Amino acid sequence: NQNLGILYQNGQVLGRDELMALDYFLRAASHGIAIAQTRLGALYEKGKDIPRDYAAAADWYLKAAEQGYREAQFSLAEIYYNGGHLSRNPKEALRWYLEAESLGETRARIRIGYLLQERNSSATDYEAALDWFRKAEKAGDLWARYKIAEMHYLGQGIDSDSDTALVWLRRMIESDRTLMAKLSSLAKGGDLFAQIGSGYLHSEGGADLRDP
C-alpha cells in the first residue's frame, strides 16, 4: 500500500494524485508502517490537493519517530523548531533533532547548534552549540562556517576573536559564493554580525568594521 502511495504522491508511472496517495498511506499507516506514517505527515504538512493540517502532520510524524524512523524524527523536529501554525517547542525540537542525529541525520547538527545558541533559553549552552556547528561543518554544511564565525566574533563559547571570525567567513564564501546573497539578506534584516561580515567582504582591504 505504501509503495502505491509513493507512486501517486510523486507522480511516478501512475500520475500525481495526492488523494489516492493519502488513501494508500492511511491503509499502511494503520498497520504501524513508519514510512507510510511519515509520508502521511508530509502530505498533511505540505499537501497541495488536500488541506494542510500541521497538527495531523505532527501526530503522524510522532508515530513514526517513536518507532525510530529517522526521517520522521527530523521532520517532527522541524515542525517544533519552526512553529508556524503550531506553538514553537524548542525543547521537543532539540529532543528529536538529537534522536535523528544519533541515527546519522547530519542535517540535524546545525539545528541543534541553533537551539543551543538561543539566548534566554533553558537549553542555552554556547560551548556545546559551537561544537555542534563544527560537527555540521565537518559534515559539509557550509552555512555552519557562518555560525562558527559569528560565535568567534561574539565570544560565545570561545574567546572573542574577530580575525578568526573573518577567516571563517572567507572560507564560506570562497566555497560557495551564492551564500553571499543569504548573508546580505540577513544583513538587510538587521543581523549585526551579518552586516559586519558583509561590510568586510565588500571592503577593499577587508578591515574590521566594528565601531572602535
Image (cartoon, helix red, strand yellow):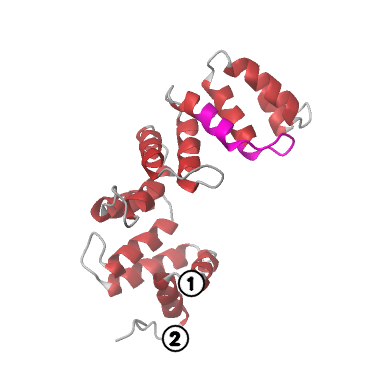
Q: Position of residue 69 (x, y in %)?
A: 46, 26
Q: Residues within 10 Å of mark 2 (few under 14, many from 20)?
A: few
Looking at the image, residue 87 lies above or below residue 72: below
**In the picture, which quadrant includes the C terminus?**
bottom left
Task: Say if the magenta span includes residue 31.
Answer: no
Q: Position of residue 114 (x, y in %)?
A: 38, 53
Across the whole image, how many numbered discs are drawn on residues? 2
Q: Position of residue 93 (x, y in %)?
A: 41, 41
* Numbered badge on residue 204: 2
Task: Say if the magenta span includes residue 48.
Answer: yes
Looking at the image, residue 25 lies above or below residue 112: above
Q: Which residue is mark 1?
A: 187
What amino acid type is highlighted by mark number 2?
Glu
Mark pair 1, 2: CA separation: 19 Å
Q: Position of residue 100 (x, y in %)?
A: 40, 35
Q: Label 1's element?
A: helix
| Residue at left offset 29%, top offset 68% | 154
Looking at the image, residue 23 lies above or below residue 100: above
Q: Which residues are magenta?
A: 45-61
Q: Residue furthest front?
A: 87
| Residue at left offset 42%, top offset 43% | 89
Q: Label 2's element?
A: loop
**In the picture, which quadrant includes the N terminus?**
top right
What amino acid type is highlighted by mark number 1?
Ala
Quarter of image, res 101: top left
Pointers 1 and 2 in contact (CB under 8 A)? no
Residue 42, visible in the rendered structure: yes
| Residue at left offset 61%, top offset 37% | 45
Looking at the image, residue 176 lies above or below residue 103: below
Residue 12, visible in the rendered structure: no
Q: Is residue 162 shown left or right of residue 33?
A: left
Q: Is residue 4 shown left or right of residue 182?
A: right
